[in-house]
Image (cartoon, grey):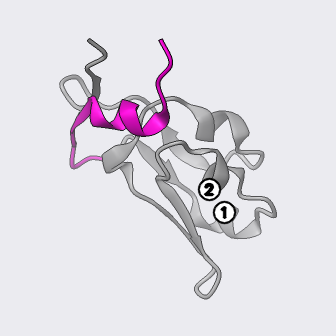
Amino acid sequence: MNINLDEIFDMTSFNVDREPHIILDSDICQKCDNRACVVGCPARCYSWDEETQKMTFVHDGCLECGTCYVVCRKDAFTRWRYPRGGFGVSYRMT
């Protein structure tokens, strides 16, 4: 079965928790020189603003894949965990 990323999003739903399951230390992100999370996140939850020199993370569409955690070389997470029970992504692959 071949499936592309857009098709995965079409079959995915989210129950968004108001409490983010990932929190970044913005001071550490400012010192990062490659920001691999921005290009590595398949859901594009991370964005870097050159003008303000600020990283933004929106957890609403997080796929909980852990890519950001793996590629972050600066250990910028003050919190990285899965969402609380009943919240987060639901894959409907059937």
Locate residue 70: give its quadrant.
Answer: top right
How many neighbours does mark 1 have within 10 angstroms: few (below 14), some (14-19), or many (20 or more)?
Answer: many
Q: Tell me where residue 14 appears, x and y as whole percent.
A: 23, 37
Taking the magenta stretch, the answer to whether it contains residue 77 is: no
Q: Tell me where residue 47 appears, x and y as whole percent.
A: 54, 64
Is 91 displayed left or right of 32 in the figure?
left
Front disc: 1 or 2: 2
Q: Tell me where residue 94 appears, x and y as whole percent.
A: 26, 11
Q: Amino acid at mark 1?
A: Cys
Magenta residues, as a range? 1-20
Question: Which residue sits at x=38%, y=40%?
Answer: 21
Q: Tell me where residue 45 appears, x and y as whole percent.
A: 46, 53
Q: Nearer the viewer, residue 24 or 37?
A: 37
Locate residue 53: give its quadrant.
Answer: bottom right
Is 55 displayed left or right of 34 in the figure?
left
Q: Nearer the viewer, residue 49 or 92?
A: 92
Residue pointed to by mark 2: 38
Secondary structure of the residue carrying tag 2 is: helix
Residue 22 in the image: above or below residue 87: below
Question: Which residue sits at x=29%, y=36%?
Answer: 10
Residue 35 in the image: above or below residue 22: below
Question: Which residue sits at x=71%, y=40%?
Answer: 71
Residue pointed to by mark 1: 29
Q: Residue furthest right?
A: 33
